[in-house]
Image (cartoon, helix red, strand yellow):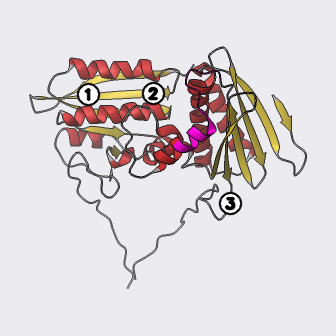
Amino acid sequence: MAEATILIEDLPVKDPNSKAKLITISGQLDESNVDTKAKEIYQLLETTQGKLSFIFDLAGLDYMNSKSIGYLTDWYGKITERGGKVLIAHAKPNIKDILQVVGLTQLIQMFESLDEAKTLILGATPQNVSAPAPGAQPAAPVPPQQTETFKLN
Amino acid sequence: MLMENQNEKPTKISITLPGNAYFMSGIRDFTLTLIKNTTNFAEKWAFRLQSVVDELCNNAIEYGSSENESILVTFIHKKEEYIEITVEDTGTGKHKTTAAEMNKLLEDRKNENYKFTGIRGRGLAKIVAEWTDEIEFTDKKEGGLTVRVRKYLKDPRYKSGLPESTPTHLVLNV
């Protein structure tokens, strides 16, 4: 049976009417454990009132199956209905790849670092955002990445 | 476990698993190791095919075989050409489906206007179909379903399984 752990922490937000949670998922989410683990998140959604945002720190997540992506999509819908944001930070390349192939990166913004995701939740401007695909509707406006061009004379 | 390996002949490995998800992490580890260590597929494709195997096995367990029955997973690797994976169930599951029903379900879900609204349903159309070059469903004479998928290493008709070329220099704007 695959092992997975979910840690939930409060994030300090300035807006007194909002709440934000850092959800750290590690291990492997598969058919043997995902239904049980998902209940922890649904319980959090039920017990937290008002505007709520989630940052998923996936640095320790090695595998996720299609059902866990289905749950993530459902949580995204529930959170955005309440005016909140869902962000993903630190995902490994294979996790980014599977989120991309199912189209979830068109909905959920991905960040290379946790600090960048936290910055967006706290209302400041992040850098190095992995922008959603064309046509996507990100949770918040994202400025274009600054690029440098070298020119030879 | 059955293994064949004679020069140019494909390598064939068959694994029988119980009809529950308990051992799925083991088959995923095996798939990753097999593809990384014995094929020339890029590491990215090892992870992708790991997901393909997991999704196919989950479907077989969920729909095709009861918990007391088993599923059969077979890997066939033709060096420098392809890897083929088949997953067979026994047709004893609570929600068994026919090959014709699976073909229709896949076609419906591959439609770009199809809306995935539930928790389930993305595995076959969004993962298995996207990351393989061939997919075929066959009804077994003795009951049950066989799903066969194949990914080519470098067939020009499909997305290459080889490592992507990585630029080693900057293109300067002059």
Q: Helix, strand or loop at disc 3?
A: loop
> In this orientation, does residue B46 appear?
yes
Q: Classify the position of the N terminus of chain B by image quarter.
A: top right
Residue positioned most to the bottom: A153
Mark 3 and mark 1: Cα distance apart in space = 45 Å
- The residue segment tinted magenta is B92-104
A27 relative position to A47: left or right: right
Question: Which one is in front, B6 or A55?
Answer: B6
Which residue is label 2 attached to?
A: A26
Which numbered dot is residue A21? 1
Q: Helix, strand or loop at disc 2?
A: strand
Residues at badges 3 and 1 in contact (C-beta under 8 Å)?
A: no
Which residue is label 3 attached to?
A: B154
B85 relative position to A5: left or right: right
Q: Position of residue B174 (x, y in %)?
A: 40, 83
> In this orientation, does residue A97 appear?
no
Q: Label 1 marks which chain's residue?
A: A
Q: Residues within 10 Å of mark 1 (few under 14, many from 20)?
A: many
- Look at 28% across and 62% down and name the residue there: A146
Q: State the image quarter where residue B160 is shown.
A: bottom right
Q: Kindly indicate whether the residues beneath marks 3 and 1 are on one polypeptide chain.
A: no
Q: How many marks?
A: 3
Q: Position of residue B147 (x, y in %)?
A: 66, 39
Q: Kindly indicate whether the residues beneath marks 3 and 2 are on one polypeptide chain.
A: no
Q: State the image quarter where residue A109 is shown.
A: top left
